[in-house]
Image: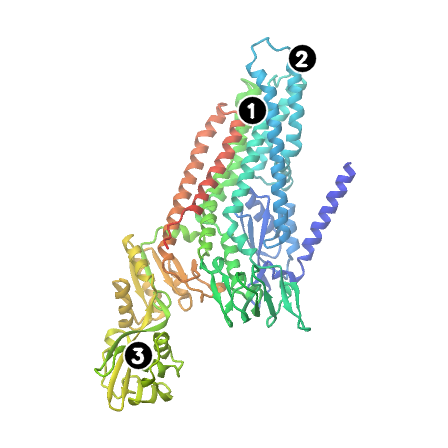
Amino acid sequence: MNMQKSKDSSMANDEAGNVLFALDEPDEWSGFSTKLTADVNQWESHIAVEGMHCASCALNVEKAVKALPGIISVDVSAASGRARLVWSADETKPSVWMNAINKAGYRSLPAADALMRDDRRKGQRLMLWRLLVAGFCMFQVMMYAMPVYYSSPGEMTPDTLNLLRWASWVLTLPVMFFSCGPFFKNALTDIKQRQISMDFPVSLGILIAFLVSSAATFEPSGWWGSEVYFDSLTMLVFFLLTGRWIELRMRDKTAGALDVLMRRLPATVERLNVNGQFERIAVRRLMVGDLVRVLPGESFPADGQITSGETNADESLLTGESRPVSKRLGAEVIAGSHNLSTAVQVRIERIGGTTRYAQIVALMERASVDKPRLAILADRIAQPFLIVVLLAAAGTALYLWQVDQSRALMTAVAVLIVTCPCALSLATPAAMLTVSGKLARSGVLVRKMQALEALTNVDTIVFDKTGTLTLDKMVVGEISVNSSLTEKEALQIAGEMARHSLHPVSRALVEATKNAAQNSDTLVREVQEVSGSGLTAESALGRLKLGSTKFCDLLDDDAKKTGSSVVHLVSDKGWLATFEIVESIKTDAVSCVRQVTENGLAVTVLSGDKLASVRRVADVVGIQQVFGDCSPQDKLVHIQTLQQQGKKVLMVGDGLNDGPVLASAHVSIAMGQAVPLAQAQSDFVVMNGNLAMLPYLIEQAKRTMRIVKQNLIWAATYNAICVPLAIAGLLPAWLAGLGMALSSLLVILNAARLAKIDTMSG
């Protein structure tokens, strides 16, 4: 039987090794890695690491990988179960550092690997079975322990007492050899690797309790005494496994936004072959220019353009737009979005890491391993804390040994169990991961977890104008006409002429008249465009001109004073109309500025446009501090001046031409889908460009930090109360196990509240 078990284990190891060696093929790297630069053979990889339960586990993984040649940097998060590695392909291969993680007692696989999801489900089922076995045995052992507790001295015969003890011992064996498997396995790995994690003191405490109870069962007259603790032991294991199982499920939910997003890409798609037939192939075989058919209910496999059919697409996880988006012939579709209505044919334009979807996933993967300041501090004290726990348990046992040897051992067990740093190490990342997943579902990508904390201290917001407060298009403002025309007639004539030009001003006039009915009396003909000046045409009103003041031979206007552009319509008989062309201000800009100013934040506009134009927009949205004609260097100097005055600055821009300014601010937000995610310098990216997300984001950051502080206070209070009680011998082992499980659960459940809190309106 042992030979068969050894053979099965060997086969499993060989299979795992083959999987890892298959990842050494450069063609496979694009599935979980990104090349950092074209001239240097360095890659950034994101992998999932299973088996981590505390900050010490993450540190053990980092230590195992950092020791390898070719590893440039490594960041591991126990809360998200993910790791980010930067490595040189000239010095190492994925199988080398993945195998190092496996040897350290953990399991690593590419984050998007389907095998990883299957293994996770199997692991959860096995964990549930361990929990059920521990629960069943616990209740049975408690049944045998109750008569001992409630019987009077001499009421129970020695034979009966021994029978109950032997029955309890037998029922404890499945708990020790099956339910405690993960604890003992990880502890053994710690010993082999000369490291320490949470499972080492837990395993030591369980083993001491079992050995003492077994010795009392076999030889009740020994120095260890006649007391048995099978009921406390099984209850301890049951509570620990219950806490770990619920913690595992809650982690899947809190960090689940990334997993859900990564599962949006289909495994296969129908591609048109050379015979004119659609055949189903793996998505990784797609090439730019391929024609694919996407059926209703399927996800689009890559970025492309619809060549046949019309449908609605769900882009909520990618842009934050909750409503279905209509996709007509020629429309762009995004990889990872869902086809909701009918089958469409799509011409593939971008695949793999060049798609918007891949860039979003990469940003979220980086954020999942990013550690805020408080989390880094907790990680630093985790392993020293565990060493202190071992020393405290040993000291307690030595001190009480002279008084009561049996009590000394069980008190040491209680100290080992109760002083677990799990709650402390989970306090910050659990809340951060929860809120970042929630924000991602709302269309806000968190690039740096540390920014959530910094956002709560912001007292000044600096807005860029173009693309941030305004849309990337112009609209018609005020219209002035002479007595011979109405505003509607003048706009209709101008719109008919403007249809023959692609100039942005012409597009604004066409947009303003697209729903107006045509009047045959005002139709224009022989429209010609004079480059850089305007348009001419013939009509029933005579020869017409549409364009600038100079082109129309008019006197100078006061448009520069108002900060807007004007377009005139004249005939050979004289002036007919003047159209004010202004930037289109975002509909939620006014409410956004009002909300942040009501919350006591100072607001400024900083723009490279003319001061008059900037002031016009600022007056509409309600901003008093206005700076125009600013070069990129001027913007940078202005931000630095505010910082020198002690201000905590939040910069909000479009992310296209203000990278240095975004990078220099305390916190920065890039607005809009045009943001180049791979080179984004901002801390947050608002995918849909909605300014309403700004006060929402600030409020979520404040709520998150309140949850973090609550978690830290709870973790510190728990240890401050329970550790002295355990050292004093007033906390039994089973209660220590319950306290340890509840401490971690309360932290995670408190963080999970963030997923349900929503202050967005509309």
Quadrant, the N terminus: top right
Return the x and y of residue 250 as percentages of the image width and height: 51, 43
- Inter-mark Cα distance, 3 to 1: 90 Å
Marks 3 and 2: CB-CB under 8 Å? no
* Total marks in image: 3
- Observer able to see residue 566: no
To which residue does mark 2 refer?
A: 159
Of mark 3 and mark 2, the one earlier in the sequence is 2
- Answer few, some or many: residues within 10 Å of disc 2's Cα (few below 14, many 20 plus, some between 14 and 19): few
Under circle 3, the secondary element is helix
In the image, 17 versus 283, the foreground residue is: 283
Name the amino acid, label 2.
Asp
Of marks 3 and 1, the one in the foreground: 3
Of marks 3 and 2, the one in the foreground: 3
Q: Residue at x 29, y 72 (%)?
A: 613
Of marks 2 and 1, the one in the foreground: 2
Name the amino acid, label 1.
Met
Tell me the number on the disc at residue 491: 3
To which residue does mark 1 refer?
A: 410
- Answer few, some or many: residues within 10 Å of disc 1's Cα (few below 14, many 20 plus, some between 14 and 19): many
Under circle 1, the secondary element is helix
Asked if residue 736 is positioned above or below residue 634 in the image, the reply reads: above
- Observer able to see residue 22: yes
Marks 2 and 1: CB-CB under 8 Å? no
Asked if residue 741 is positioned above or below residue 623 in the image, the reply reads: above
Q: Quadrant of residue 459?
A: bottom left
- Inter-mark Cα distance, 3 to 2: 106 Å
